[in-house]
Image (cartoon, rainbow, N blue to C red):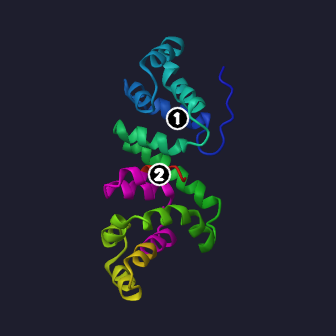
Amino acid sequence: IINLFISGILTPTLFRDMSTSLVGDEWRRLARRLGMTRIRIEAIEHDYHEDAPYYMLLTWFKRVPRSSDKVLLLIHGLININRWDLAQDLQSIKDDKRFEQGTSSKDEQLKLFRAPFMRICQRDECIRIWKQLARELMLSNEVIQHIEQQYPSKHERCLRSLEHWALNQPRADIPCLARIIRTLGFKPLAREIENMA
């Protein structure tokens, strides 16, 4: 029996529900996406038969490093096997949980992002395309124009765009920021930001 203390979102009940939603060999594909070896997958299948998908999720959870964002890893895994519906459900649970914990004050919110924002604004290639970054951050043209008029330096414009996003986007978090940076083609920087979460 796997003795688990699952805190937060990923509970045995959630894993049970999710495992029953996985069809055919989807659970095997998900296991591979989550970094499990074929041998381990076969062993789980051999030991647990119909319950294999459930025990695969529990086994994975136990082996992921403490510091990892397990929810995000699982969301990405589900997207990779084209189970957008399950990924969406998980994201909604995560958002609700964050909302329950109370939205912190603006200063607190910006404090969370200070380190990644500084890293981005240290990069000339990011500052150069601050407008493109602002659009990826879903800032409106009005906001972009306002920032442009208010602040003469591109460095400042880049920082203000990021701050505007952090304060006004309900789903603003570090993994989301890393995804946006990756979309713009800055893969190593995106990885660095992910590690700040």
**Residue 28 visible in the displayed image:** yes
Q: From the image, which quarter does the N terminus lie in?
A: top right
Classify 10 Å Cα crowding around label 1: few (below 14), some (14-19), many (20 and above). few
In the image shown, does 60 or 177 lie closer to the viewer? 177
For label 1, the SS is helix
Rounded to the nearest angstrom, the CA distance separating label 1 from label 2 is 34 Å
In the image shown, does 49 or 44 lie closer to the viewer? 44
Residue occupying the point 60% across, 30% down? 62
Look at mark 1 in the image and give the residue it sits on.
Answer: 17
The amino acid marked with disc number 2 is Glu
Q: Is residue 123 in the magenta section? A: no
Q: Which quadrant of the structure image shows residue 100?
A: bottom right
Look at mark 2 in the image and give the residue it sits on.
Answer: 192
Which portion, as a residue range, is magenta?
Answer: 161-190
- Residue 38 on image: x %, y %: 42, 19
Residue occupying the point 61% across, 66% down? 103
* Left or right, residue 144 beside residue 57: left
Residue occupying the point 36% across, 88% down? 149
For label 2, the SS is helix
